[in-house]
């Protein structure tokens, strides 16, 4: 349907807070413009949760006012009909649309309208205006306030702004801007189009900043611009992306030679800057692994011969790439214990022999009584068979030894990514930088880097992997 023939719904909501996955709507107001005909729809909603005092003071909506009002599920069908097939217009539309979308989702209704943000419309039509919040629009355009911070009252203000734009620029220009905004990927209200247009379609790392240059999120991609726009596309359907989009104020980026360089740089920057929205790739001080020691005796065991003993070693005792008896790599002792216990139950291994319970002389473990142990603790299964089954069960968790005699470089465009014993030494562009990095010493082992290197060694062709001699006896052309 052409924009000029569309029905426009000017929407505003009041809520118990700013988090759509936790907080709830207390009021919805809608003003509909259909072929120059105006209609209004509004209701208070019982949020079934506490309304904070500061919200009560701001909106004037108290618990007593909503106590007898319908819950969202009671008005969901009527609201859906009211908004169906209309262009959803709101000021800072991600907030209002995000809340309504999530409320619909809780009752099983899919809601994905075309959304127009009047903050962006104001930026397009009044580029020299310093601020574009609703209070500024009221002041600049002399809008009539009937009930500020009440849903229908604010929806009326949004419509007044629409009328003001039409009076100043004409209906045709206004609809052109609407068509432009609806046809373009939705950008966060504080991000200018020019900023996004500068992003390169190249590999690298991008950084989202909040106010005061606080780092929100760090990501990587082989196409920075496309990936950043993917965040903004997803903001209307993904809660995390919406939260990022509402807070982002600036974007920076660093280009790399390729995907491997982007992965390595992303890992380092996240550990250095600790962005609030990055959970993975955080540095762990509690990294640990299971060390397999063969030949120990088990107190209380009736089995004959040596059996395998597993000891948990922390990152201080991990000699990366040199030990052939390490299994797992876990971010915490709790994760390591949980993983091993799950393996024991799945494979009917004896939890007593693995140290999860103390074995009494001549007595079986608890698992034997519930048929979760094959009886290694009481001699019904030999230690050799139990050891073999344990080794087989742990094989997928085995930490590989370093497959080279020393350091290597993986060539990616003009970059040389330097590694030694599963540690990342840095990126160089010539022989001098390579040996400077080698002389800096061995960095601390990092689980994320280990995974990146493992994948790289599988995926990069052998002619791009260069073994580094221990002395400066090769020419620069060797790289």
Image: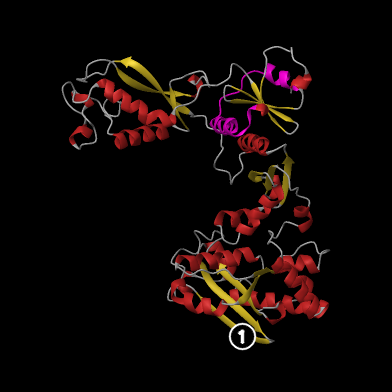
Seen from this angle, which residue lies furthest left? Answer: 362
Residue 215, located in which quarter of the rendered image?
top right
Image coordinates of residue 428 in percent, x first then y, are 73, 26
Q: Is residue 435 magenta?
A: yes
Image coordinates of residue 394 in percent, x first then y, are 39, 29
Query: Is residue 189 among the parts visible in the rendering?
Result: yes
Reply above or below: 454 against 303. below
Q: Nearer the viewer, residue 40 or 68?
A: 40
* Secondary element type, mark 1: strand
Q: Quadrant of the N terminus?
A: bottom right
> How packed is label 1: few (under 14 Cα within 10 Å), some, or many (20 or more)?
few
Image coordinates of residue 220 in percent, x first then y, are 65, 43
Q: Tell me the magenta residue range.
A: 433-462
Query: Is residue 333 among the parts visible in the rendering?
Result: no
Residue 289, located in which quarter of the rendered image?
top left
Q: Quadrant of the C terminus?
A: top right
Please name the predominant secondary structure of the magenta segment in the image. Answer: helix
Reply above or below: 144 against 21. below
Q: Is residue 195 magenta?
A: no
Q: Which residue is mark 1?
A: 39
């Amino acid at each position: 349907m052409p924009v000029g023939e569309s029905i426009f719904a000017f929407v505003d909501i009041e809520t118990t807070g700013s988090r759509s996955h936790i907080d709830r709507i207390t009021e919805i107001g809608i003003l509909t413009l259909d072929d120059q005909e105006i209609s209004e729809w509004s209701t208070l909603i019982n949020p079934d949760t506490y309304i904070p005092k500061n919200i009560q003071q701001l909106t004037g909506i108290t618990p007593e006012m909503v106590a007898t009002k319908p819950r969202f599920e009671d008005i969901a069908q009527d609201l859906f009909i009211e908004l169906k097939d209309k262009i959803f217009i709101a000021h800072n539309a991600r907030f209002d649309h995000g809340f309504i979308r999530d409320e619909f989702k809780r009752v099983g209704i899919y809601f994905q309208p075309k959304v127009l943000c009047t903050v962006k419309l104001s930026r397009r039509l009044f580029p020299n205006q310093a601020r574009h919040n609703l209070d500024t629009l009221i002041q600049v355009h002399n809008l009539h306030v009937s009930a500020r911070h009440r849903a229908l009252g604010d929806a009326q203000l949004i419509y007044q702004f629409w009328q003001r734009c039409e009076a100043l620029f004409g209906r045709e220009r206004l609809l052109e801007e609407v068509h432009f905004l609806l046809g373009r990927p939705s950008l966060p209200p504080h991000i200018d189009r020019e900023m996004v247009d500068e992003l390169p379609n190249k590999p690298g790392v991008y950084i989202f900043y909040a106010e005061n240059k606080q780092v929100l999120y760090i990501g990587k991609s082989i196409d920075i611009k496309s990936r950043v726009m993917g965040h903004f596309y997803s903001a209307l359907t993904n809660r995390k992306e919406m939260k990022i989009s509402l807070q982002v104020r600036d974007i920076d980026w660093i280009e790399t030679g390729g995907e491997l360089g982007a992965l390595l740089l992303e890992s380092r920057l996240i550990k250095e800057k600790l962005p609030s929205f990055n959970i993975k790739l955080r540095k762990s001080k509690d990294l640990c692994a299971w060390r397999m020691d063969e030949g120990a005796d088990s107190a209380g065991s009736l089995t004959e011969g040596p059996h395998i003993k597993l000891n948990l070693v922390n990152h201080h005792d991990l000699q990366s790439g040199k030990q052939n008896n390490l299994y797992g790599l876990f971010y915490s002792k709790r994760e390591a214990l949980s993983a091993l216990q799950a393996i024991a139950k799945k494979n009917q291994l004896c939890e007593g022999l693995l140290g999860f319970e103390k074995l009494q002389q001549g007595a079986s473990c608890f698992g034997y009584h519930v048929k979760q142990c094959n009886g290694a603790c009481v001699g019904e299964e030999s230690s050799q068979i139990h050891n073999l089954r344990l080794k087989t069960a742990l094989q997928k968790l085995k930490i590989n030894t370093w497959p080279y005699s020393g350091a290597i470089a993986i060539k990616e465009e003009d970059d040389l990514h330097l590694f030694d014993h599963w540690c990342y030494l840095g990126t160089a562009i010539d022989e001098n930088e390579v040996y400077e990095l080698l002389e800096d010493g061995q960095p601390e082992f990092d689980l994320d880097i280990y995974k990146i290197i493992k994948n790289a060694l599988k995926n990069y062709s052998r002619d791009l992997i260069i073994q580094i001699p221990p002395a400066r006896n090769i020419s620069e052309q060797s790289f």
